[in-house]
Amino acid sequence: MALHHTLSLAFGLLGNIISLLVFLAPVPTFYTVYKKKTTEGFQALPYVIGLLSSMMYVYYALLKEELKEDATLVITINSVGCVIETIYIALFLFYAPKKARISTATLLFLLNLFSYGMMVVLTRFLATGETRFKIVGWICLVFSLSVFVAPLGVLRQVIRTKSVEFMPFPLSFFLTLGAVAWFFYGFLIKDYYIAFPNILGFFFGVVQMAVYVVYKNAKKFLEDQPKVQELSEHIIDVMKISTLVCPELSPAVILNPTVDITNDMIEVVQNIIVMAEKTEKTKEAAIDDDFSTKV
């Protein structure tokens, strides 16, 4: 019995630590939002659902305490989660475009205020004791699944754009570890409202990490292509402008040897310059021929 209690306490503490890391995982994302002063393609839905889930489990844990069952570990981490998720949502609302701000505020009202408020009122007045606890337990179970499913909405965007920019890997990784810890905690204390959703949570976390591994280098490859084209066009434009402004300026002067450029890049640039010179010579020849014809 002592071993059973020790194991449940250990997994509960581990779950608290990992869940805290889960809540903190989006910090780099919101740091990027803060630096760019825009939410870009980021979605607020995972944070709204996360806040609602934490609110639900705080209420669930308080009902469990009313039945003389210890739920301290559930109360502590979900209270912290409420604070952190609220900060994320506030930052999102501050930097989001008007349309995203309105949709997020609407979600907050419908889910976190209206729906949560109705749930609390109805369960307090229409149910009692064990029945109330079971009803809230099932509601929490459904919303726990929503927490794990919500980030999957980004998968479509990742596959479509071949970019993992908007699906942070730390969040998926810690969600998976947290699912393992909370499953064993719920299993050991025989609280299946906590244990069951974390089975699917583990599965969803693995799927997200697999997608991240597949597409993590795809965006870099796609971005490199237009950059080469832009570089080519930029160098050609520089050649044309330099010829107009300073005719005696040669390509050797433009490519200053003090600039740190790799051999491959130098070769590419030289080829582009040759092509540009041939193009200019062709144009000049065409103009001379046209002039001769007119004369």
Image (cartoon, rainbow, N blue to C red):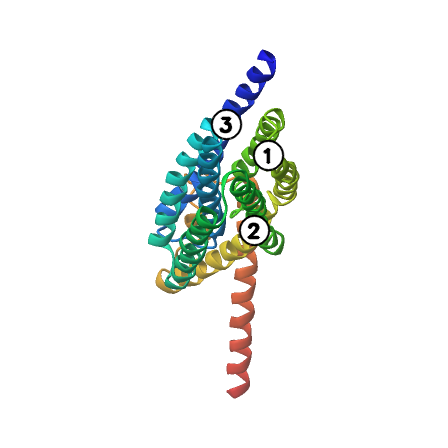
Residue at image location 43% in from the left, 39% down from the top: 28
User: Could you say whether the residue bearing mark 3 is in a helix, strand or loop?
Assistant: loop
Q: Residues within 10 Å of mark 1 (few under 14, many from 20)?
A: many
Location of residue 72 (image quadrant): top left
How far apart are labels 3 and 2 at the CA level? 38 Å
Q: Residue lying farthest top?
A: 2
What x and y, as percent, mark residue 203? Answer: 66, 39
Q: Looking at the image, which is closer to me, 136 or 149?
A: 136
What x and y, as percent, mark residue 289? Answer: 55, 79
Q: Vertically, is 125 above or below 4?
A: below
Q: Residues within 10 Å of mark 3 (few under 14, many from 20)?
A: few
* Front position among marks 2 and 1: 1
Residue named by callout 1: 176
* Front position among marks 1 and 3: 3
Q: Vertically, is 21 above or below 53?
A: above
* Mark identifier at residue 69: 3
- Disc 2 marks which amino acid? Val
Residue named by callout 2: 154
**Does residue 129 show up?**
yes
User: Could you say whether the residue bearing mark 1 is in a helix, strand or loop?
Assistant: helix
- Disc 3 marks which amino acid? Glu
- Disc 1 marks which amino acid? Thr
Location of residue 7 (image quadrant): top right
How far apart are labels 2 and 1 at the CA level? 17 Å
Precedes in sequence: disc 3 or disc 2: 3
User: Could you say whether the residue bearing mark 2 is in a helix, strand or loop?
Assistant: helix
